[in-house]
Image: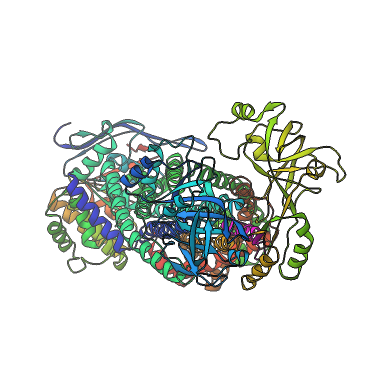
Amino acid sequence: MTSQLVIRAEGVSKVVPTVEGELTILDGIDLEINAGEAVAIVGASGSGKTTLLGILAGLDMPSHGRVFLVDQELTSLDEEQRARVRGEQVGFVFQTFQLLRSLTALENVMLPGELRGDPEANRDALNLLEKVGLGERTGHYPTQLSGGEQQRVAIARAFASRPHVLFADEPTGNLDTSTGQRIIELLFELNDEFTTTLVLVTHDDRLASRCQRVVEIEAGRIVP
Amino acid sequence: MSLNRNLKLVLRMAWRDWRSGELGLLLIALMVAVGTVTSVSLFVDRLHQALIDESADFLAADRRIGSSNPIPEEFRIKAQARGLAIADTMSFPSMVFVGDEMNQLVSVKAVDPGYPLRGVLQVADEPFAQGVVTRDIPSRGEVWLDSRLFPALGIEPGDEIEVGLARLKVARVLTQEPDRGGSMYDLGPRLLMHIDDVPATEVVQPGSRISYRLLLRGDDSQLTALKNELPLEPNYRWQGIRESSPSIGSALSRAESFLLLGGLLGVLLAGVAVALSAHRYARRHYDHVGILKTLGATPSQIMWGYVILLLVIGTSAVLLGLLVGSALHVVIVELVRSLIPVELPMPSARPFLLGAATGFICALAFALPPLLHLKNISPMRVIRRDLGGAPPSQYLSYGAAIAGSLGLLIWYSGSLLLTAWTLLGTGLALLIFGTLATLLLRSGRVVGMQAGSGWRLALAGLQRRHKENVAQILIFGLAIMLLLILFLLRSSLLDEWQDQVPADSANHFVLNIVPEEVDPLSAMLDGVAKNQGGLFPMIRGRAVAANGIDAETWEQERRSADAPGPSLQSERNLTWATEIPEDNSLVKGEWWEPDEQRALVSLEEDYARSLGLDVGDSMEFDVGGQSIDVEVTSLRRLDWESMRPNFFIIFSPHALRDVPATYMTSFYLPREDKRFLNTLLGEFPTITVIEVDAIIAQVQSIISRVTQAIELVLVLVVASGCLVLVASIQASRDGRMSEHALIRTLGGTRKLIAGSLFAEFAVLGLFAGLVAVVGAEITVAVLQLNVFELTMNLHPWLWVVGPLVGSLLILVVGMFGARSLISTPPIIVLRGLD
């Protein structure tokens, strides 16, 4: 793997058992993503794009094929090792924000640092919340924040681990147009500042158009 | 990651969980488990100690060593070396004389200054007066006498009497002594004297019938150690309350079994509550763990995190639970102080150890499996909700819960048999409940189709959450079943006990009635005493041969020397009867016809079995030098706990009718009519009257105390059961919240939701009540037959009361637990749903 390449998928397939027999979700995906690149994965519902994102990020394992992330072959690691890779290399932003409801905004953003044992977790988290414009809301719980604000906390948390790669699953899917627009701006702004590689799954054409490359998935295959 | 850092992180997360109320229920469930067990066992432990102390009064000691030979000095030295308190007594029958005319057979007990080691003596200055407690024993040269000896001998306190060659002054009237119980035939009127005066009487000669006893008081462990150290066999008998007084012993054993059963059910219920809250906690943390994993938390970090978290929670719950349990037990003791007139001794460490162990075992066996499962949650769940969280391994969950329960139950009860029956009952009930609950839910859905909207919603909900509801019916059913079992056993045990010693059962026995006195004595008793028992002839005699083999050889070949029960060769009280006595039941053979002309005999079944005798065997008796050959034609079972004359050996009338006999009878005399004994003894100076009213009073006081303990345990178990209900409603709360929010969003009114909840809890309670009744009937029948040795009976009223109680209980607790479900605005609930 060259140093330019951050992600490489070779012949990745995902087959799951269902009551009607086996279902092929991904079928022989080959994909390479360079450092600093912003890539949008698009496709209809059920095309397999979210499953692909999960496999590229090491959240799930393919049935066949190999996946490399930064300098590691994810498919040769066990869950324990993959978790470490995620903690060190990867950040996530989700459609449903996925903040821990029992934690305040600050505590949510501190979490990756705490898991790494970073003594600066608190200061870094405060800085990031300032950056996303929530410096005044650090003590608020997720249920006390609007959808846009929750997603900003999630973005701050995603960058808290200083990731090489940021994976985003429909980051504007739950937001209205103007809030979604502000979130897009924030995401790319921070992406530039931290020189992160961005891989996102979206239905949002505006968001896809901001990326350097669009990969379209149809019935588990990349549309050439 | 270092352990230290991990611990800090876990503590921080625990604090955050606690702040959001997530850990509250688990902590409370564990705390209540510890608190319930601690308070029940503290109370039971102290009450048990008090009961043991009280019953030790029957021995006047904790244990005693008895023999017809003098107790060796070595025994005393070894007992004292172990720090045990000791006292010597000697008992023997002797004639006492006043001048040349008056004499009376008495039962002498000579004691030394340590006596009694347990219980108290009571004395009075006048015969038949109320006694007062004394710490003294008769001084040298003095004796204390039973009230009834004064009229029999025609003396007053202060007079002198002759015992053997010694002249002793009658100083006081003995009204009560602790170890008066035991075999009633040893009880002549009592003469209590100082042991140092015995040599002067010169009544102790070779061949004298003397019972030597060494009384012992001290720790159980020291007593057991001494027992193992001494060369007791074959001449010295070690006696505890169970050996010396079978009727008190068996009442105590039952009480212990019952109290243990109560505590044991409390432990099981607490375990269920802990498991429910742990499962809910784990389910609510699926997303939490998924997110943590996407952020880089490794499975081992997750696992150790939750293990440490559980230990932190467990330790806090144990500490709080011990405090709460101790406080609760103090409250209980205060509440019943007026009811329990004994001073409760300080508790041992065992209840606290048991409470703490219950907390940790509950945490590990009931709460750890679902928490451990969290490490297997896939991080993909965060973006693909449909992946859900596979439920924790059932083998692990149930295996750990069963192992944990078993361990706790066995340790708690110390009885494999009781534990096995309880678990068998529970297991059977679960099987029956599961099937029954499924059928009931299906039928409920069919009925629901035709019902109004509230009921339809409720029954559809019950059917849709079919698995959860079967589980809930099982849990509710189990809790109600346990309560019913406890209630049923409590009432049947109490009834049984009360029946055994009715308030007006015979409390006096009259012996040595010569045939000419039978009619006038009966006539005199008719006027005053109630419940006069039948008249039994009494003849002393002993067996000399069985089936042509001499008694000694027969016994040596069939019975080990230290086997319990009476020996074949010893002299016994024999009787003859036309009819089988009341309370005796025939277990084998046939009772003779009234005009039977053969010499036949009926034996008590245990006596016959221990001696290898059966129906059809022949026996030879020596009665006053006369040889009588008889055939065994029946075996009888006696009710030893009844206060009536009982005989091991009863002859057919023809066999003994011509042998000179004295008679015995029994009657009831209220305490206020005690002076009647003076008149009776004045009229018939040669008869012997034995007063057992003191023994009966003691038995009744023990029974009433045990009753209170049982009622208390019942209340505590009900409290544990309610906790299970609340935990169970909490466990289904999240699902219900979202469902109700959706219904209300679609236009359902608050009234509809309340109505459907009402219907759902009522139906759930009804079903749970029904299955509980089935389970309770089966378990109680098995327990009654096998553990408590009572007769089995069904309870038709239970089939009405069980479902009614189930519905009411679940309705009240359920509506209380679900009130926020009705009042929460739907938007709050929907916003909270991811």
Q: Nearer the viewer, residue B218 or B508?
A: B508
Image coords of residue B255 (percent x, y): 53, 55
Name the quadrant containing residue B393: top left
Is B599 in front, or is B59? B599
Residue B175: x and y in percent read: 53, 66
Q: Position of residue B387 (x, y in %)?
A: 41, 45
Which stretch appears magenta?
Answer: B485-509
Residue toward you, B600 or A192: B600
Q: Is residue A43 visible?
A: no
Q: Quadrant of residue B633?
A: top right
Per the picture, the main secondary structure of the magenta-coloured stretch is helix
Is residue B559 in view from this perspective?
yes
Coloring scheme used = rainbow
- Looking at the picture, how far across and down is residue B122, in whole percent? 48, 66
**Foreground residue, B569 or B194?**
B194
Task: Give the residue displayed 12% in from the left and 59% down from the top.
Answer: A123
Q: Is residue A221 magenta?
A: no
Q: Is B673 left or right of A53, judged from the image as shown?
A: right
Quarter of the image for the C terminus of chain B: give it: bottom left
Give the farthest residue toward the right.
B595
Left of B771 or right of it: where is B275?
A: left
Is B504 a magenta residue? yes
Rendered-image quadrant of the N terminus of chain B: top left
As drawn, the residue found furthest toward the front would be B100
Whether residue B416 is situated above or below residue B547 in the rendered picture: below
Q: Residue at x 51, y 56 (%)?
A: B179
Question: Does residue B798 appear left or right of residue B421 in this picture?
Answer: right
User: Disc count in the image?
Assistant: 0
